[in-house]
Image (cartoon, helix red, strand yellow):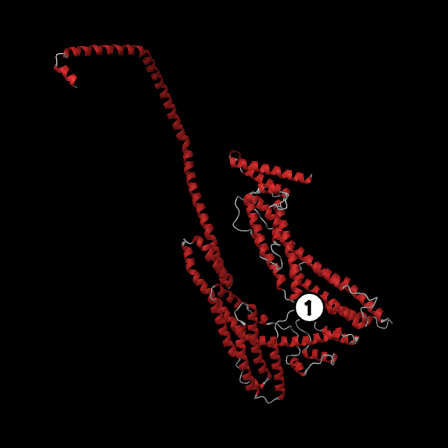
Amino acid sequence: MKNTRSVYDGEEHGRFMEKLEARIRNHDREIEKMCNFHYQGFVDSITELLKVRGEAQKLKNQVTDTNRKLQNEGKELIIAMEELKQCRLQQRNISATVDKLTLCLPVLEMYSKLREQMKSKRHYPALKTLEHLEHTYLPQVSHYRFCKIMVDNIPKLREEIKEVSMSDLKDFLESIRKHSDKIGETAMKQDCRYNQWKIIAKIFFSLLLSPNIKAQQQRNLDNIVSQHPRISGGKKSKKEVCASSDLEVKNTSPMSEQDSGILDVEDEDEDEEVPGAQDLVDFSPVYRCLHIYSVLGARETFENYYRKQRRKQARLVLQPPSNMHETLDGYRKYFNQIVGFFVVEDHILHTTQGLVNRAYIDELWEMALSKTIAALRTHSSYCSDPSLVLDLKNLIVLFADTLQQPFPKKFPFSEFVPKVYNQIKEFIYACLKFSEDLHLSSTEVDDMIRKSTNLLLTRTLSNCLQNVIKRKNVGLTELVQIIINTTHLEKSCKFLEEFITNITNVLPETVHTTKLYGTTTFKDARHAAEEEIYTNLNQKIDQFLQLADYDWMAMEPGSKASDYLVDLIGFLRSTFAVFTHLPGDVDVHSTMSGKVAQTACMSACKHLSTSLMQLLLEAEVRQLTLGALQQFNLDVEECEQFARSGPVPGFQGDTLQLAFIDLRQLLDLFIQWDWSTYLADYGQPTCKYLRVNPTTALILLEKMRDTSRKNNVFAQFRKNERDKQKLIDTVAKQLRSLINSHHS
């Protein structure tokens, strides 16, 4: 800056300007030279640029024309895309609506089911439905307004169920109050008949086993017993039976005056079988009400209410009418009411868990005892008729006996057993009658009777039993009863042997004595009935399996087992309950029917397992997905749960589950895709998949491989799918190698 100022201030300004001008001229010459050197290139560039401008204009025109055409052509596409956009939006809305409805519809269906159950007065199922609705369905859709209304109504519905069930209980209490005298009358009749039958049975067995009895006495006794083919009651009048018994065995089993008086108390021409308390009164209301209050957590309230009401009824029952002492019917009605009351309470005691207990019964009995004794002392003091006093004594004895024997008395066998036994005896009598005046020795008569009886047992009776067993539409209950009946008939064969010995006086130790073949006949019939049970069960299982409708191409499994299988398991549970709910002697019935039940249950489970395996492997199922296999696995798990639940007692450990072991290992292998373990351990005793046959595995693998190839069009472009296909091919190759090595 200083040098520049010195130039302007000093005398060298002119010189500086000259130098500057000279330098400018030099630069101008340099610039001119440079321009002259590049001028031709510049001209060429301008020329090219002008050409490019023309081409660019053409291109612009072409682009503009193409754009115009594209816009014209794309208008329909844009409209279609807008429509597609709206459709997609609607589709999403519909899908969301369907999902919401899928959650809401079960709630509405359950609520409708609840209202229907309450309308039809099925209160206990309604309560279970209500509980299911509250804890399972409503929480999933609790934010909807209608669900909030339902939630608010639940306490009201519970209260309504309680009130209705309590109303039913009150009707029940009124019913048993009205029927107490009839129930008591029934119980006392049964007691009278039971005493009568004890006498007849005692006479019968004493005559049957006595070696000195005469054939005529046996025939007379048979005439008595043949009039009573049923176990639960007789057809002749009580007086007639007692008189006949007294005439036949006056010195063997005399009846006391007290026994005769008891038998004279009731009507003498009673022909109908006497019903039990459960036939006169419907006890279902008290059971339902008890269940409902138990579920609602108010069982104690219910128990207290029931006991309080029954105590009130007991006091009413124990109040004798003022004119009771005038006739025997007055006393009889009084006793009938008391007996009826305690028969009902005894029935409740044995059919409910804790509604009444022994202490409660004893408390009522102590009250009844004191009041009854006081009433009898008071009213008997007005009685001046000796015959009425005697009849009253007999009535009191019958009353005491009735309150001491359990009712109803049940036998494991049906009427079939005594009827068959009596028919065989009739045949033996006929043979004995036929042998008269033929001048045969006692040994020959004995041999003829035994051989004829054997023909009756092995031909006629055996064919009859087989025809009954093979009859169409014979139920499982009937088959089980046949098994029980033939078991008791088999045990009775020794009595037939003794019976023949008694009437022929030929000892069984005689060298040429023919043995009876009844045991074999009844065993064969029992085995035939057992086989028929197994066959019928398998046929029923096949009928359910025909309802199976698997979607073998399903990509995802359902949330529960298939409906047909749930119904099948329910049928099996109810069927095997038949084996445990039949009346009978513990030692004979439970052991015998339990063995049959175990065999039938194992047979059914094995048949079900085999059928499911065949269903999975059948040729018609050409393809299946992993989702379908997982649904099938849910069904097998349902079967295994049934086996674990112990439908029939007596199985050790997981014995019943082993029926499904082949299916379980096969499904585990495929669902877990554990081929490395299977191929590495194959043939070893400790192999995890020991029950999986390589042929079976290959068939199932081929079905899944075909599905993968056909359903995945772009599988070849995805590495995971390619790797899966390679693995399937490798496993299939190794399975074929195992199969070939096994065959070789």
Q: How many marks?
A: 1
Q: Position of residue 1 (x, y in %)?
A: 17, 19
- Residue type at mark 1? Glu
Q: Position of residue 214 (x, y in %)?
A: 79, 76
Left or right? Give the position of 372 relative to 417. Answer: left
**Is there any visible trace of residue 612 in the rendered image?**
no
Q: Nearer the viewer, residue 636 or 264?
A: 636
Q: Secondary structure beneath disc 1?
A: loop
Screen quadrant of the C terminus: top right
Image vertical order of residue 203 relative to residue 484, above or below: below
Q: Within 10 Å of the Cα at label 1, are there few (<14), some (14-19), or many (20+) other Cα atoms? A: some
Task: Tell me which residue sits at (67%, 58%) in the image.
Answer: 533
Q: Position of residue 359 (x, y in %)?
A: 53, 73
What residue does disc 1 label? Answer: 415
Task: Tell me which residue sits at (41%, 36%) in the image.
Answer: 79
Task: Tell me which residue sits at (56%, 37%) in the image.
Answer: 725
